[in-house]
Amino acid sequence: MKELSNDLLEELVTECRPYSREGQVVKDIPGQRTIDQNKLGVCIINMDNEVFSAGDTDMKFSLQSASKIISLMMALDDFGKEEVFQNVGMEPMGDFYNSISHLEAHDVTKPFNPMVNAGAIAVAAMIKGKDVDEKFNRVLKTLRKIMNNNSIKLNDEVYESEQLKGDRNRSLAFFMKSTGAIAHDIDETLDLYFRINSIDVHTTDLAKLGVFFANGSRSLKTGEQIIPMDHINTIEAIMMTSGMYNEAGKYAVDVGFPVKSGVSGCIIGSVPGRYGIGIIGPSINEKGNSTAGGALLHRISRNLELNVFSVIRKDKE
Ligand code: GLN
C-alpha cells in the first residue's frame, strides 16, 4: 500500500491524463466549449481534515448529476427513508441516465433509482419549501455548511442552458405526472432540478462533501451530526449500485467504494471512515462518466487499497 501524498497524486494524474482522449467534453455546458479536454484534477481529504491535491484543482465546474446525491440527502432528511422510497426505487437501471423507456416498461408508479434523471426529478419533488426559491436556498445553505464555503452558488449561465436544453427532462417529468409517479407541480420541480444541477463547485468542495459522508454525516470540524447517519448509509449504498449509471458494476469491481459522476466530468467519491474525493476530468464517455477521472479513481483505489471489500477482509487477518 502506498501512502497518500501530493506527489503520488501528481504521478497518478500525469499517468491518467491521456485517457481524456477516449472521451469528449460536453460543449453545450456554458464555460466548457473551449475547455482543454486534457484537464484533470483531484482533491482528497482525510479524516484529520488534511487536504491532498494535484492537477487542475483551480477549475470550477457545475455539479450536474453529482447533485443527485444532494437532492436525495435533502429528501431523506425531509421525509425519511420509507416515504422517499415510496416515490422512487432503489434498484440499478443498467441503462443510460436519461432513459425514458424504463419508465413505462418497468414500473409506472416510480422511477428506478435516485441517481438517474427520472429518479432525481421525483426526488426533487420531495424537497420541502414554500416555493422554488425557498427550496433551493435550503439546498444551498446545507451545501455551504457541509462544504464550509459560503461562496457556493448557482451558475446563472448553466441554469439558463439547463432550461433551454431541458426537453428530455421535461418529457421524463410529464410522463411521471401522467402516471401519478409525481403529484407535485412539474414546472416548479423541474426548475428546482435544473438549479441544483447548475451549482458551481471546485474539487475541494466535492472532497469536503465526500469526507462528510465518510464521517457518517458529522462535521469534521465540530463533530455536529448534520444529517442522520442512516441516511448517508442509504445514499452511499445507492451510489455504489447506481452512481455511475450503466458502469456502476465496473466501478464497484475496480474502485470498490461509493462514487457519483456528473456530465461536467466531475466525480465525487466517499471511502467510509477514510477519505472524501473530488475529481474533475471534463472529457466523458458515452455513459456520462469522466474517462480520465475514472482511470484516476481506479489507480487511487489500487494504490491506497481503498476497495471496501478488501479492507474488511484485511481487518480480519
Ligand atoms: N444536467 C444533466 C441532465 O439533467 C445532468 C446529467 C448528468 O450529469 N448525467 O441531463
Image (cartoon, grey):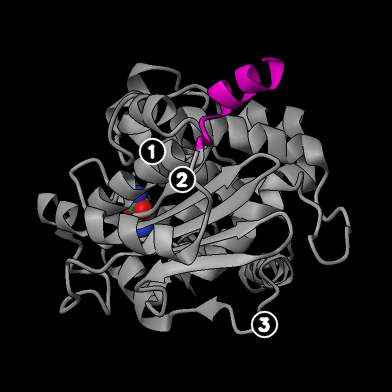
- The structure residue drawn at horizontal position 32% and vertical position 31%, both measured from the top left corner, is 247
Q: Tag 3: residue type? A: Asn
The answer to the question of whether label 2 and label 1 lie on touching residues, with beta carbons closer than 8 A, is yes
In the image, residue 12 sits, relative to residue 295, either above or below, namely below
Q: Secondary structure at mark 3?
A: loop
Q: Could you tell which of marks 2 and 3 lies nearer the N-terminus?
A: 3
Q: Which residue is mark 2?
A: 260
Percent position of residue 289, x then y: 29, 47
The image's mark for residue 158 is none
Q: Is residue 312 magenta?
A: yes
Q: Is residue 58 magenta?
A: no
Query: Can residue 43 be seen?
Result: yes
Q: CA distance from mark 2 to mark 1?
A: 6 Å
- The structure residue drawn at horizontal position 72% and vertical position 42%, both measured from the top left corner, is 76
Q: CA distance from mark 2 to mark 3?
A: 23 Å
Q: Tag 1: residue type? A: Met
Task: Write down the region rendered in magenta.
Answer: 305-317
Q: Which residue is mark 3?
A: 150
Q: Taking 165 as reference, is 173 left or right?
A: right
